[in-house]
Image (cartoon, rainbow, N blue to C red):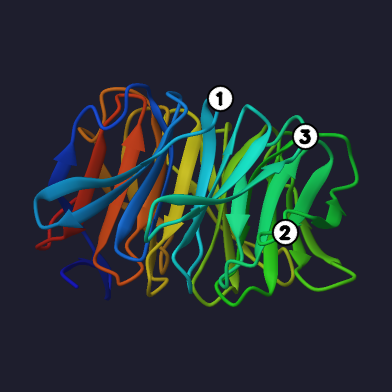
Amino acid sequence: LPSLSVGTHMATLYHPTASQLNAHEGGISCVAWGHGLVVTGSADEAVHSYDVSGAKIERRHTLTGHELGVTAVAVAADVAVAASAALDSRIRVWNLDTGSLNLEIDCGPMSYGVALSPDGATVAAGSMGGISLWDAASGSKTASLSIGSDRIVLCAAISADGALLAAGAEDGGVHVFEMEAPYQRVAKMEAHAVAVRCVAFSRDGKTVLSGSEDSRAVLWEAASGRQLYTLQGHGSWVLGAAFSADGSHVVTCSSDQTVRNWDLTTGASVQTLADSHSDQAWGVAFDPSGGRFCSVGDDRAIRVFEATVAGGE
């Protein structure tokens, strides 16, 4: 990929290549990318899927049925299945090939973040006091993972190998659990004093990234909870975060309306995409094949970025 020299290291940079304005009727709160599709959720209660080809973003499916705003979406890595969570206390599991509903789960109040296992068999959803795991075929609850308090879990992620689950809570805690019974908590990280809004795993599952209302993102060693880097530069809440496919860098987005690109060899911000959104930016997601990522925000826009020539901050 094109890169910028940072000391003796080459950092990847990006430039905007595609935009979809007014992609939803309300602000876009979440995004995922998989199986050639960008999947978005919105305050307008809808989930959309989009094909992205060069400078073109074309809607493939409109997935309806939620009765309040959508708070999170996730895509399974190995099968064309997506899940969405909304303020209506429902999780909906979707077939991305057909745009049809596979299953609706009544998950109870205070459900925010959602994650899917790579095989699409398990849905994880944040709630008050922990994470609930659901069978994506039957809708039955298979486990409840406690964070040891009654605080709400706002975000969740499952590692690419399906072995670990990360959860971020409103008290600033980040928790990592094993995804097999007895679902042991292997790490608890406490670098944030206020709510954690996003969590993400590196492709190899060894590293967790958390973003918080304290305007910082923190990089952790998943197995031990050891803090690796604190990424500082955003002027307001960090609302979304994602790792590049090769794990060399991450992107974050914020209510300060910017998207930042961070080099993980140095922990430095190597690029600020300042004109990405005209309102707070809620989510970022990488194309699993590498080389591209997208961002979404309250301005109802989808922005797509590709690796570019060297330059930057």
Residue 253: give its label: none
Q: Which residue is mark 1?
A: 67
* Residue 129 makes an appearance in the image: yes
Disc 3 residue type (three-letter): Gly
**Whole-percent x and y of residue 69?**
52, 26
Residue at figure coordinates x 67%, y 68% from the top left = 222
How far apart are the two marked residues, 1 and 3, measured between alpha carbons?
14 Å
Q: Badge 2: how crowded within 10 Å, few (<14), some, or many (20+)?
A: few
Residue at figure coordinates x 46%, y 24% from the top left = 43
Disc 1 residue type (three-letter): Glu
- Asked whether the residues under the numbered discs 1 and 3 touch, taking CB atoms below 8 Å apart as contact, a structural biologist would say no
**Whole-percent x and y of residue 29?**
45, 33
Q: Badge 1: how crowded within 10 Å, few (<14), some, or many (20+)?
A: some
Quick one: label 1 or label 3, which is nearer the N terminus?
Answer: 1
Q: Quadrant of residue 183?
A: bottom right
Q: Which residue is mark 2?
A: 138
As drawn, 222 above or below 86: below
Left or right of residue 90: residue 280: left
How far apart are the two marked residues, 1 and 2, measured between alpha carbons?
22 Å
Quarter of the image with the N terminus is bottom left
As drawn, 24 above or below 56: above
Disc 2 residue type (three-letter): Ser
How far apart are the two marked residues, 3 and 2, measured between alpha carbons?
17 Å
Kindly state the secondary structure of the residue where label 2 is placed: loop
Of the residues tagged 3 and 2, which is closer to the observer? 2
Q: Which residue is mark 3?
A: 108
**Whole-percent x and y of residue 2?**
15, 69
Q: In terms of depth relative to the viewer, which is nearer, 223 or 5? A: 223
- Asked whether the residues under the numbered discs 3 and 2 touch, taking CB atoms below 8 Å apart as contact, a structural biologist would say no
Kindly state the secondary structure of the residue where label 3 is placed: loop
Q: Quadrant of residue 116?
A: bottom right
